[in-house]
Image (cartoon, rainbow, N blue to C red):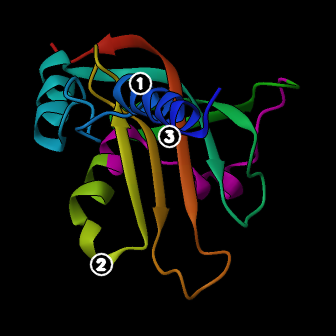
Amino acid sequence: MTSTRLINLILIICSLFLLFYCDANPINSESLDLESAKAKWNNKRIYTYTINEKVDCFCLNAGKFFEITVSGNTINKVVNIKNGQELDPQYWSLFQTVDDLFLLIDSLNPESMAKFEVDYNKSLGYPSMLNLDYSSQIADEEINYTLNNLQIVGTYK
């Protein structure tokens, strides 16, 4: 095979790779924006729920999934999913309710942050992933929330 044919083959392979594996629009067109997600969440009128939440940060109890029980936007119970142990209330401040996460997201200016990524649950609208890095110049201030398996226990009448 001549070098010209080899170069052409490599160019074709690279072009095909770019065509099939690179998205021209880096934002998923099916993803919800903040206002749509909040509207979806509020329309469900959820009052009491359980949700699995993991917080990754340079802090105590980070990196583990906990089942959070929330009623009226107040955390009532936090249980370590892996061992079933209830977490002492003095450590609950690490966790956020769905409404608190919406307030946090709404208060941030993504352009002023080193990293701001958020995804919303498509059926219920709650934030399913929130990755924050306030400054690339500061170590260990990043915080990431992962939420899943929301179970509705009660709704507003």
Q: Is residue 26 magenta?
A: no
What number is the disc on residue 16?
A: 1
**Which label's residue is closer to the chain start, 2 or 1?**
1
Q: Mark 3 or mark 2, which is nearer to you?
A: 2
- As drawn, 153 above or below 108: above
The outermost residue toward the bottom is: 137
Separation of residues labelled 3 and 1 (CA atoms): 50 Å
Q: Regarding mark 2 in the picture, which secondary structure is present there?
A: helix
- Comparing 107 with 20, the one in front is 20
Question: Which amino acid lies under the numbered mark 3 shown in the image of this protein?
Answer: Ile
Separation of residues labelled 3 and 2 (CA atoms): 30 Å
- As drawn, 56 above or below 80: below
Residue under circle 3? 75
What number is the disc on residue 120?
A: none
* The residue stretch that appears in magenta: 84-101
- As drawn, 36 above or below 103: above
Q: Relative to 10, is 122 on the left or the right?
A: left
Q: Quadrant of residue 124?
A: top left
Q: Quadrant of the N terminus?
A: top right
**Which label's residue is closer to the chain start, 3 or 2?**
3
Identified at 17% across, 35% down, the residue is 38
Q: Is residue 90 magenta?
A: yes
Question: Which amino acid lies under the numbered mark 2 shown in the image of this protein?
Answer: Ser
Residue under circle 2? 112
Callout 2 crowding tier (Cα within 10 Å): few <14, some 14–19, many ≥20: few
Q: Relative to 70, is 28 on the left or the right?
A: left
Residue 108, image x and y in percent? 27, 67
Q: Quadrant of the C terminus?
A: top left
Mark 3 vs 2: CB contact within 8 A: no
Separation of residues labelled 2 and 1 (CA atoms): 36 Å
Residue 95, image x and y in percent? 56, 49
